[in-house]
Image: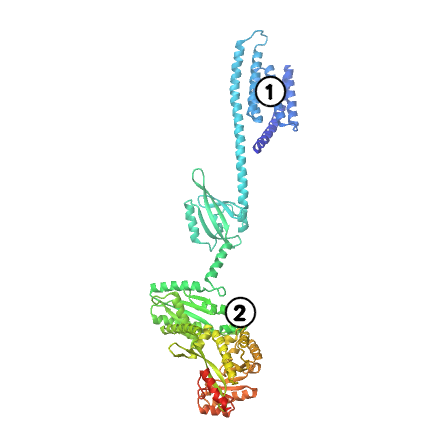
Amino acid sequence: MAVQNEVAHWRAQIFMRILQVVLALGLVTALPSIVLSLSEGIWSIAVIDVLAIAWIAGIWRLTHVSYRVRVLNFLAVTFLVGIGLMVKIGPLSQIYLVAVPMLAALLLGLRAGMWALAVDALALGLIGYASNTVGEDTWNAAAMLQWAVITLNYVFIMAVLTLSCGVLLQRLERSIGDLQGLNEELRLTSTAVARLNDMVMIAEVTDDEHRIIFVNKAFERRTGYQREEVLGRSLRLLKGPDTSAGTLERIAKAMSRSEAVRAELLNYTRGGEAYWVETELVPFADEGGNNTHWVAVERDITERKKSEDDIHRLAYFDVLTGLPNRRLLMDRIDKLLASSERGHTYSAVMFIDLDNFKYINDARGHAIGDALLKNAAGRLEQLMRKADTVARIGGDEFVVLLAHLGSGHAAAAHAALVVAEKIRLSIAQDFLIEGQNYSSSASIGVTLLPKGGQSAHDLLREADIAMYRAKADGRNGIAFFEAGMQAEVEQRLNMERDLALAIDAQRLWLHAQPQVDCAGRVVGAELLMRWQLDDGGWVPPSQFIPLAEESGQILQLGAWALRQACGFVLELVAAGHAVPLSVNVSPNQFRQPDFVEQVRAVLAETGAPANMLIFEVTEGLLVEKMEETIERMHALAALGIRFSIDDFGTGYSSLAYLKKMPLYELKIDRSFIQDTPADPSVTAIVQSILAMAHHLGLQVVAEGVETRAQADFLVANRCQGMQGYLFARPQPFSMLLSSLQPQHAAA
């Protein structure tokens, strides 16, 4: 229907043009024709011309009349003028009749043209025959034959012309339909391409370059270029300094072979902003197979690439410092191992731990701690070569890989030591953070590679072991891994495992060491933990207690010791002995948030009187969160628990806390007692502690008393309690209980 409307509109326009031309030419030719006709006395011709012009003018003016009626009137005028002229002038005027079927085919279609031709032929034959037999009363067969021949030839020629005109118009109508469909399809395609979110470019293949001939709106929005700015320019318009040359070369090779290609490219906008696209270039060829155009469809993948980069950074780099993390470090150690073995050179792995970082982090907050870590990472990076690696593997631990230090072991070890010393000195310098200086130091463990059959995990473990040796040797130092260190670590791991088994198998014991007064009477006892092996031997507390502290097993041991102490207190009460028992409490155990509730629960469960328990704590407990610690001590004191400061004078060494803490006694460390009274300086310190305690109303117990001279000195200076081998060694609690019976009887 749309095509028919289009053709009808086209025919109406042609018809109006024909009317205008006929009127114009008719006026120009009719006036001379009328004058000549009148001069010759042929009035009928003049009348025909006037009527014809008037009729056509009416057809032209009456536009409200339907198209078909107007065309039929126009054809009738033409036909009647032709007939009139043939009658008056003769057969030469049949030229008018020629126009009728052709105009009918043009303006109304092939069928109307053929009907007009039939009417023309009939009129021509009849009028021609009649004009040649005027005045004859009989049938003239010769004349009829003559006009039949003329009419047939006329029909043949006019049929050819009319059919040609009609078929041409039909084909044209069909072509218009096809063209309209193609135009509609092209319009939809063009609209779709223009509105695509993907960028589209079409380039024409020329001799020297691919010139852009089309871009869509998405291209304009993303690149900042207007369409007029890019038309005629190269497809390489958007490349920039960081666009991959290798990718461009791959695309160029594919285009030279007229092959479709897909790639990811870094492009640049008109303003210089870099963005990533996934581009696909497809060639288009003409009917001869020659590549004439390229279509490039590009999708913005900047956010996807950013997400990929973020994922890569999270997977392989430390979020805080931006340094490689453990995963990437292990990969680089593997590669360094392989390259060192191939090149027969030595490299090094350094494990670096920041000393006392936890104190800064806890005291000043994580923001300061993070800033210190970032500053430390920056210093490490400044000291390294491009071939080296600095990684952060967690907390305050860094690892440095020094690549290819030399072909000789001694030279490589010396080079590693030089770098390690630079690191140690650099970290030892104060860190200026938010206007304040913070000091730290580094314990550094070093191991060299390659070593036969070792993996990245083995090397990292060796450097870690060496670092702990440096830390054990006083911190702020450097230690190289030695084979004996591994044995120590394995022994430590075995001991940790055996201790866990001993706890489960109940092979731990609490022995009691009596504390006596000036008269030698037992006034208290300290409970000391002992570990007996299957073979009957004993593990020294100096070995397994620190191990339990580090492994966290001290919490289980402390809970067990408290419950055992409560049981012993009940035995003492049942035997009628008011002898308090001292229990060592680990800082880790004391700092548990629910420690007060644990103690309250055990006391309630066992029924042991709290006033017969003395918790021995060290001065180191006060280093962290002093106010919270003192508050917890007051809560325990409210239950009846008494407190003793163990190893007084060797730890925190601040007397300010003595006034705030609910203390019952001080214990003078054996390191002071062993040189008393022979060393005047140490003797003066002991006397000062005793005098201060007397003024503060605190009890004093001297540890490590082994000679009579030490005991006499302490008695002379009014020391209330003494503990040491001079009086008794640590013993099973049953022996202590037995020894108290005679004392009780004597009393």
The residue carrying pointer 1 sits among few (fewer than 14), some (14 to 19) or many (20 or more) residues within 10 Å by Cα, namely many
Which residue is identified by label 1? 79
Residue at 43% in and 48% down: 252
Residue 20, picture quadrant: top right
Q: Which mark is residue 166?
A: none
At label 2, the amino acid type is His
Picture coordinates of residue 327, whole percent (x, y): 43, 63
Label 2 to label 1, Cα distance in Å? Answer: 108 Å
Give whichever of 23, 373 is nearer the camera. 373
Picture coordinates of residue 265, whole percent (x, y): 47, 52
Which residue is identified by label 2? 366
**Left or right, 448 with reference to 510:** left
At label 1, the amino acid type is Phe
Give whichever of 710, 739 is nearer the camera. 739
Residue 537, picture quadrant: bottom left
Give whichever of 292, 195 is nearer the camera. 195
